[in-house]
Amino acid sequence: MKTVILFLTLSIFTWAGLYAQPNGNYITMNGGNDNVYIPHASYWNLSGDFTISMNLNFAYTNYWQMLMTHSPGGFELSFTGSQLWLSPTGIGWGLQAAWSPQANTWYHLVVTRTGSTISAYVDGQLIGTGGGSIGTANSPLRLGNYYVNGYGFYGNMDEVSMWNTGATQSTVTTVLANPLTGNEAGLVGYWKLDESGAGAGIAVDNAAQLTGNTLDGITQGTTTTPYFTQVPPPPQYCLNFDGNDDMVNMGQILNPVFAGADKKFTNHTIHIEEGDTIYIFSDGYSDQVGEATGKKFKSSHVKELLLDIQDKSISEQKELLEQTLEKWMGSMGQVDDILFIGRRFSFHT
């Protein structure tokens, strides 16, 4: 039997999203000549510490695609169909990391260097490291293509940023995983890709306050591509929690396979407030038999326990849940697998 109790703190900056979900509009490229052209700046020469961050959604994953390039002479950040590459233009590489993304799925990609080590993260998880020098050039920066219009990116791209500082894994999973304000230290380029319309010639705003509109981009492609896609608005109605003792009791939901009849289910939208904690747990905790009573712990006691401890820190709650379970079990063996997940939400503006 396994017992897993996992508690997480999720910091959210201005929106209650998960990794790599589009924020506002996003750009869609068709894999041909589509790209966003950004004028040359010395910041694009990756000679020191740097960080590149972007949200990606591939339409196809079985061929080589350029994600960002500073070429000729600079660097290429590309996906080969099975690997993520960061390399000097045309020769060698600074990073090769195995990666197998699924089509039509959003991913948060970060490539960063601190000192001599180049690291790549996908959705906050390290996928590979490398090193070596990256070339310098007086070339423009391009999102989604190469300087000779080959190996174009086919899919959606959002929230692209460049920094002249390295990033730790903690920074990757907090600051970089969320929309930015534009005035963060070290931020030298920030293209939200929130524009609207289709085709070549659309100005793309650089929201990094350090560099401003001198490094705005412009779309290149055809009369109809690339184009900007609008994210659907949030639902009109939602359920509001006060962060204290509110909860929704969904009652017992029988699996139709065992109930012998079709069941109708209702979708519920929950609006998360500052300090709210959401708990998800299997029935292994409530079904655990105690040594002193010979009876199950029961779900009603689990709810009472959560209400008693919900105002404590995440780490304290995890410890109290483990201690309570161990005390209840005594010398009794564990009767079922136990999974307990808690997530507290903290909002920043």
Image: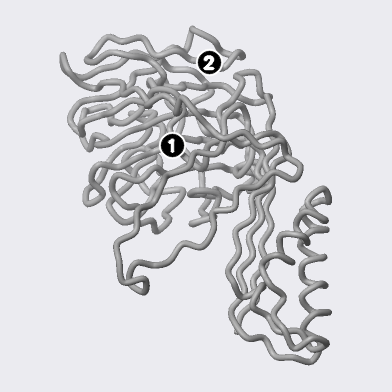
Q: Report the residue at 22% width, 15% height from top.
A: 199
User: In which quadrant of the rendered view does residue 179 lie?
Assistant: top right
Q: Is residue 32 left or right of residue 214?
A: left
Q: Is residue 239 left or right of residue 59?
A: right
The first of marks 2 and 1 along the sequence is 1
Q: Report the residue at 47% width, 42% height from top.
A: 268
Rounded to the nearest angstrom, the CA distance separating label 2 from label 1 is 16 Å
Q: Report the residue at 20% width, 26% height from top.
A: 33
Q: Position of residue 212 (x, y in %)?
A: 54, 10
Q: Report the residue at 42% width, 25% height from top.
A: 137
Q: Image height check: is 191 above or below 68?
A: above
Q: List the residue tagged with mark 2.
A: 207
Q: Position of residue 12 (x, y in %)?
A: 63, 35
Disc 2 marks a residue whose amino acid type is Ala
Which image quadrant: the C terminus?
A: top right
Which image quadrant: the N terminus?
A: bottom right
Name the mark on residue 242. Answer: none
Residue 48 in view in this figure: no
Disc 1 marks a residue whose amino acid type is Asn
| Nearer to us in this view, 50 or 285 | 285
Which element type, helix, strand or loop, lies under badge 2?
A: loop
Q: List the residue tagged with mark 1.
A: 55
Q: Is residue 345 left or right of residue 136?
A: right
Please tell me how crowded label 2 is: few (under 14), some (14-19), or many (20+) other residues with Cα within 10 Å.
Answer: many
| Nearer to us in this view, 244 or 323 | 244
Which element type, helix, strand or loop, lies under badge 1?
A: strand
How many marks on residues?
2
Q: Image height check: is 327 above or below 198?
A: below
Q: Position of residue 208 (x, y in %)?
A: 56, 17
Q: Position of residue 150 (x, y in %)?
A: 20, 34
Q: Image height check: is 324 above or below 243?
A: below
| Nearer to us in this view, 68 or 105 | 105
